[in-house]
Image (cartoon, helix red, strand yellow):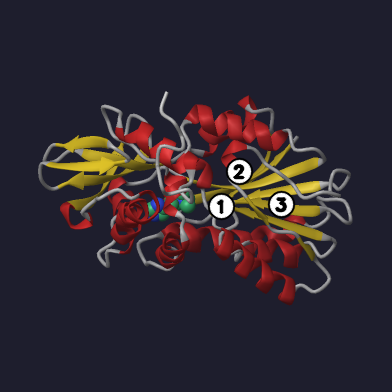
Amino acid sequence: MRDERAAAGRPDVDAEFLRDVLDGLDRPQKALLPKYFYDEEGSRLFDQICELPEYYVTRTELAILRDRAGELDGLVPDGAALVEPGAGSSVKVRILLDAMPSLSACVPLDISGEHLHASAARLAEDYPALDVRPVVGDFTTGIDLPDGLDETPKLLFFPGSTIGNFDPEEAGALLAAMRGVPGVVGLVIGVDLRKDPERLVAAYDDPQGVTAAFNLNLLTRMNRELGTDFDADAFRHEARWNDGDSRIEMHLVSTCEQVVSLDGARFDFAAGESIHTENSHKFSIESFGELAASAGWRSGRAWTDPERLFSVHLLTP
Ligand code: AVJ
């Protein structure tokens, strides 16, 4: 067993991050967890991705929500709280807040603390009657809610197709954990749909290189926070469609043979060898419904856009 304090002299190193990276780089197919994209710079780049013409995801989901949020009114009891795991910039949640004026509280959860606090402050300013209770944390290891909300009915909001980041088993476990939140009355969840692979690859490999910068930022982050010596110029971004697993994969491909060291360990890269940094699973309405059912949710409405690019599902316990 490796000593978690082995990053000697760097007491500020995040032990979990270090352990995940050491584990991930030690595999035959090197891999890193996508949650580590979201440092300050990564969160900023992700917001930029959402504005890209090729990245239809955010824009399409926003249009569906704007069209349909009115149908949510009356669904939740008065005084309910809206809980958003992975809230990021908390843009979409405003559509729900506007459609459901009886909501009394909003709980954005995010792994990126500074980003979360800044957006929670803006939310509190714009919704003075709302109790905004941001929680910094990793929802993949448990959904922690602030004190005093145990008895409050809760509507969960999980937009953006973030569920697609997880393997089917992990996704099932996460949906089951959401189903188990005390007082939960529903889940509004955004789910990206299968479509022409060319369109998918373009959405994850834009000509402006924003997605490439987002992917490569992970190397810069590891260098800064863990003391790795990655040469970001010796890796290139790649987006691949994996049809069998119905997912877009992002990789960082080593452009040459090289060695990277971390905490006394050495990791060899062959030219062309990749680090698998993200999966983004794509569903059909039916395949997602089955996944949700396996986690104990009942499918309610499922809304899509006219091109059937994206879907928003309303699930009930
Ligand atoms: C935030 C996980 C939904 O998979 O589409 C965007 C992240 N990665 N471009 C996605 C992402 C590259 C995004 N999710």
Residue at numbered disc 3: 83
Q: Amino acid at mark 2?
A: Phe
Marks 1 and 2 sit apart, C-alpha to C-alpha, by: 8 Å
Does residue 133 appear in this view? yes
Q: Is residue 1 left or right of residue 106?
A: left
**Position of residue 282 measured from the top left corner of the image (x, y, whole percent):** 43, 41
Measure the alpha-carbon separation of dots 3 and 2. Answer: 11 Å
Q: Are marks 1 and 2 in contact (CB under 8 Å)?
A: yes
Give the secondary structure at mark 2: helix
| Disc with the residue nearer the chain's start (1 vs 2) | 1
Q: Is residue 262 left or right of residue 93?
A: left
In the displayed structure, 59 sits above or below 33; it is: below
Circle 3 crowding by C-alpha within 10 Å: few under 14, some 14–19, many from 20: many
Q: Residue at x 69, y 44 (%)?
A: 187
Report if residue 308 is visible in the image: no
Vertical placement of residue 126 versus 228, above or below: below
Q: Earlier in the sequence, mark 1 or mark 3?
A: 3
Task: Specify the amino acid type for callout 1.
Answer: Ile
Q: Which residue is mark 2?
A: 139
User: Residue shown at 78%/41% (left/top)?
Assistant: 184
Q: Between residues 4 and 49, which one lies in front from this camera angle?
A: 4
**The C terminus sits in image quarter:** top right
Quarter of image, res 280: top left
Q: Position of residue 236 (x, y in %)?
A: 20, 52
Total marks shown come to: 3
Q: Give the number of the disc on residue 297.
A: none
Q: Which is nearer the N-term, disc 3 or disc 2?
A: 3
User: Residue 111 bears which disc, if any?
Assistant: 1
